[in-house]
Image (cartoon, helix red, strand yellow):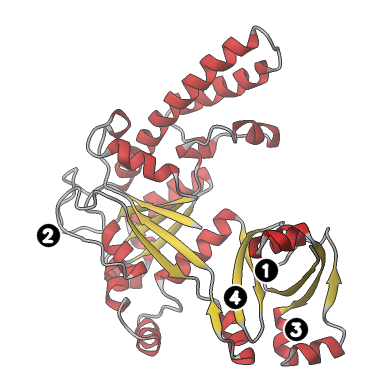
């Protein structure tokens, strides 16, 4: 999973990126501090994998990973090449989803590029640049479809969809909010749109607002209303707090979060929302050699999941021996789980479930 972190200059984006990844990206109080995208790879916390490691004491322990990309700040006109616009848009295109950091805190010490805090304006600024870039792509697609129509009438459906999308975008609405049919979603796959990418709005609050009643922050409520309207996710977060806990060990971090009345860190909440947004789950493999978590799309069948480990596993798939993690944990060992009949033999049509502990049998 690759999440691109975007936002106007000086909204706390690079500070949050540093805190979530400990990558040490430069962060300062002036626009375009981030020019080339900074990349941070973080392990996905998974208590189930930790438990398997305790059971097996493996030589190797490999959690799933998440890639954060801190993308250069954006200004109006980016779709026309203003500021670092072209670079910004190219970086977003490579990401699976967007974390849009929106400033919801007031501060005289941190300069806002527009001179004031206005979440609605800020969100529209970035959305419009993505929309403008998409419109250029769709206009080229429309021209091509109209030329192809002269020889093949099947392109009429493509023209109808593209024209409908263009009208939607021209009204200032992102492709995320377009009412695609399943057939139309398949049609548009060949033209990935920036404004169609799933979004988590990270509402960056000051510490007092974040640990108090978030719903009393008028800026947060603006972001929430926008997210709700387009079916996106809004995540209240405090980059300042995340920065404070970034270098703490696990026990100190847990104690600090408890004092603030928080159950988990911002990183854990971002990961949870990211998995849900992209429809991802994890299955687990366990043994003395390695305990490992594998990320797949929800709905993946057993042979394709096996292919995540090695293409030979998918090509020569015979069966999957599967036990639910909770059942394995309750039994204590794989042998005990087998004796109780909790290990199932599943074939090619089995749809993997989150938390499956699996051994793939194959022959090539």
Identify residue for label 2: 109
Q: In this view, does 25 lie to the left or right of 302?
A: left
Are the residues flagged by discs 2 and 1 in contact, CB closer than 8 Å?
no
Q: In this view, does 290 lie above or below 272?
A: below
Q: Which residue is drawn at 28% across and 72% down?
A: 243
Identify residue for label 4: 292
Q: Which mark is residue 249?
A: none
Identify residue for label 3: 327
The numbered mark, 1 or 4, whose residue comes first in the sequence reads 4
Quadrant in the picture for residue 19: bottom left
Q: In this view, does 329 lie to the left or right of 277?
A: right
> How would you rate the neighbour count of disc 1 (Cα within 10 Å): few for under 14, some for 14-19, many for 20 or more?
some
Report, in whole angstroms, how far the alpha carbon at label 1 lies from the one at label 4.
14 Å
Nearer-the-camera pick, 322 or 272: 322
Q: Residue at x 63, y 36 (%)?
A: 185
Q: Helix or strand or loop: what does disc 2 sit on?
A: loop
Are the residues flagged by discs 3 and 4 in contact, CB closer than 8 Å?
no
The numbered mark, 2 or 1, whose residue comes first in the sequence reads 2
The numbered mark, 3 or 2, whose residue comes first in the sequence reads 2
Q: Where is residue 236 in the image (x, y as percent from the top left)?
A: 39, 62
Query: Does any portion of residue 301 appear in the rendered image?
Result: no
Q: Helix or strand or loop: what does disc 1 sit on?
A: loop
For the C terminus, the quadrant is bottom right
Q: Helix or strand or loop: what does disc 4 sit on?
A: strand
Q: Which residue is drawn at 50% across and 48% down?
A: 198
């Amino acid at each position: 999973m690759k999440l691109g972190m975007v936002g106007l200059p000086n909204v706390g984006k690079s500070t949050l990126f540093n805190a979530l990844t400990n990558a040490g990206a430069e962060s300062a109080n002036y626009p375009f501090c981030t020019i080339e995208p900074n990349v941070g790879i973080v392990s996905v916390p998974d208590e189930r994998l930790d438990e398997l490691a305790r059971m097996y004491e493996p030589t190797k322990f490999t959690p799933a990973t998440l890639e954060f990309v801190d993308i250069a700040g954006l200004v109006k006109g980016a779709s026309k090449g203003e500021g670092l616009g072209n670079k910004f848009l190219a970086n977003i295109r490579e990401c699976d989803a967007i974390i849009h950091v929106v400033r919801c805190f007031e501060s005289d010490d941190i300069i806002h590029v527009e001179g004031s805090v206005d979440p609605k304006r800020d969100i529209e600024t970035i959305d419009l640049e993505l929309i403008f870039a998409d419109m250029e792509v769709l206009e080229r697609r429309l021209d091509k479809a109209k030329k192809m129509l002269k020889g093949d009438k099947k392109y009429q459906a493509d023209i109808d969809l593209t024209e409908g999308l263009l009208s939607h975008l021209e009204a200032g609405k992102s492709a995320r909010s377009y009412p695609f049919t399943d057939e139309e979603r398949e049609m548009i796959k060949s033209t990935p749109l920036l404004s169609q990418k799933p979004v988590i709005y990270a509402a960056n609050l000051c510490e007092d607002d974040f640990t108090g009643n978030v719903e009393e922050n008028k800026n947060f409520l603006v972001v929430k209303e926008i997210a709700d309207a387009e079916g996106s996710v809004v995540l209240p977060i405090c980059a300042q707090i995340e920065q404070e806990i970034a270098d703490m060990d696990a026990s100190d971090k847990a104690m600090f979060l408890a004092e603030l009345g928080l159950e988990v860190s911002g990183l854990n909440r971002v990961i949870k929302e990211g998995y849900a947004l992209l429809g991802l789950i994890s299955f687990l493999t366990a043994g003395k050699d390695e305990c490992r978590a594998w990320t797949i799309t929800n709905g993946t069948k057993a042979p394709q999941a096996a292919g995540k480990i090695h293409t030979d596993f998918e090509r020569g798939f015979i069966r999957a021996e599967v036990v639910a993690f909770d059942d394995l944990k309750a039994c204590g060992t794989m042998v005990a789980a087998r004796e109780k009949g909790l290990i199932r033999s599943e074939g090619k049509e089995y749809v993997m479930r989150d938390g499956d502990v699996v051994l793939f049998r194959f022959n090539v």
